[in-house]
Image (tube, rainbow, N blue to C red):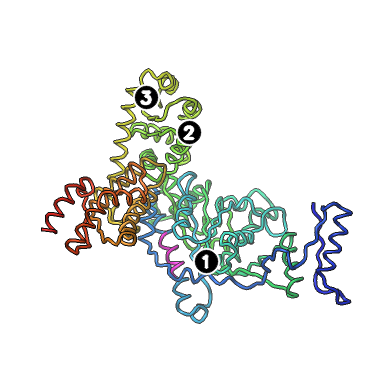
Amino acid sequence: MTDKIHIQGQDPQGQDPRKIEKELGEFLNKKFGGSVKIISPSIQTQQEAISGKMPPKGKKELINFNLKPSDLIDYLDQYVVRQDKAKSVLATKICTHFNRIRHQESSGGEIFKITGNIKSNILMLGPTGIGKTYLIKLIAKKLGVPFVKADATKFSETGYVGGDVEDLIRDLVKEADDNIDLAECGIVYVDEIDKIAASPNVMGAQVSRTGVQRALLKPMEETEVDLKVPHDPVSMMQELEAFQRTGKRNQRRVNTANILFILSGAFSGLTDVIKKRLSKQSIGFGSQLTIAHEEIDLLKQTRTEDLVEFGFESEFIGRIPVRCVLDTLSENDLYTILKMPNNPVILSKKLDFAAYGIDIVFTDAALKTLAKKAAIENTGARGLVSVVEESLLAFEEKLPSTQISTFTVTQKVLDAPDFQLKRLISGNSCKEMKQEYLQAKEAYKGYITEYIKKNWKVFSLRHGLTLSQIRCKMVAQYYTGNVMEVEDAVKQIKRFHDSVKEIEVEVSKSYDLNIVFEEDAIDFIIQQFIDHSATSEEILSKLYDDFFDGFNLIREKSGKNRFFLSKEALMDHETYLNDLIRKEIR
């Protein structure tokens, strides 16, 4: 490690520190051969001091937050199957939470602050693999707010071995790029919260259970979290360095009043508590018969007393006023998930094969078979991942070593994988397999086209691009030709559209000609971008070669300088120019 000697300020006798530095440097160089360096304040990289002042940007960025619950639900519908109740609860309470922050900031902040802060912290209940974490990740991505996720099992009460719950808030500041104001409007998501319920079989303090519940009480309501970590040497060194430079101690704290806490867990065993409560029969004419309930139906009847009986302290549950129960997924739901254009299971597998230059496509029958197998796993959407991986692992191992560039997952591939793999590698049925691929690809492209047509208004408003039927097909073509979400495919078509408009501007600047592309011409050029990977420079060069001389002649003879180009004109420029010259000059 290179040693460093710091020289600061002026010598007591008034000598120039630079002269001293030079002489000392020469001495050290002779003695140690350059392994020791001198770094003075004049050349040392200046690190920003921990001033304790908040960054200039922060909550003001949320003033423009105007997302409505219905908008957020529409967004979630593109990714998540069913869970209508959970989508409704999450979208409504989260949008209201951030709109309240925006309203308070725009109305004067502290002036109109209500005494007794109430937050809509949310508790999500439901079996594993039904999309609890996925929902929250989607919402955080859409909102663009700082978001941290952690498992409750990694924490312990402050002072014991394990993570400190206040580390969640510090992580939130890191996610906000050290912007405290922005971090104070973030989301903290704690999964596996049911694992910190007190165990009835253990006597005494349970620091990893009730201890964590108590440690979460203040952050979930409102408290000040110091960013300085007493047991963190890096944090202490930063504070010491700042004190040496400024002579002041600075404290950086995060207020948790506007930080939304979302907790989730499978809560296996809670249904037994609910059954016990429901089975208590009243005596007399008011008694009711106990009927059998599905597990999910029992969870939907959860009360505070059930959660307390389960092992949570009443103070902890009291800080989670909003609850939602997610539905279990049926076989048909799993099939719908696989069919959704944005589902990460199929997109991830496409990406795996695309890494080897192989385009994989799934038939509808294959998706139904995969969903049926996943339903047997009884682990929700997680079962889909296991089934897909198990079914295609042999193909993923062998096909990259061949010249095969397309792979169709059919019912036959899933029923007899070994036979189909040998058939693929042998190449004896190359023509038949190519036909299978083209049919499956075309069918999938048709499905995506219909999906985009169904949601064209949402996409059009969101991206400022009118999605005609032709453009819906373009989006579907681009989506099926690349591994991406539909939203990204729409964005790419919008970029192509903007490039065409930029070409109009460039022609005006470079050639002093005012050309306007008609809608069918814009679509024609976008198609060139998609089919041939054409560039704007190539389009400009083609336009100059085909039209400049003709337009220039018309301008000289008639003074006309505004020309409209249709798709027909771009495809047959000679006929277009001849007709235009006869019309304008005569």
Q: What residue type is labelled 2?
A: Tyr
Q: Residue 356 carries which label?
A: 2
Labels 2 and 3: the sequence-earlier one: 2
The region drawn magenta spans 91-99
Q: Mark 3 points at which residue?
A: 412
* Circle 1 residue: 185
Q: Distance between the residues labelled 3 and 1?
A: 52 Å
Q: Mark 2 and mark 1: span between their CA atoms?
A: 42 Å
In the shown orientation, is residue 36 left or right of residue 578?
right
Q: Where is residue 138 in the image (x, y as percent from the top left)?
A: 45, 53
Residue 380: tell me if it is visible: no
Tag 3 secondary structure = helix
Sequence-first disc among 3 and 1: 1
**Which amino acid lies under the numbered mark 3 shown in the image of this protein?**
Lys
- In this rendering, the answer to whether 573 lies above or below 315 is above
The reply, left or right, for residue 328 in relation to residue 184 is left
Label 1 crowding class (10 Å Cα cut-off): few <14, some 14-19, many 20+? many
**What residue type is disc 1 on?**
Cys
As drawn, the label of residue 493 is none
Question: CA–CA distance between discs 2 and 3?
Answer: 23 Å
Q: Which residue lies furthest to the left in this view?
A: 586
Q: Residues within 10 Å of mark 2 (few under 14, many from 20)?
A: some
Rendering coords of residue 437 (x, y %): 34, 30
Q: Where is residue 84 in the image (x, y as percent from the top left)?
A: 37, 53
Relative horizontal placement of residue 362, taking residue 129 as reference (left or right): left
The residue depicted at 26 percent of the width and 49 percent of the height is: 546
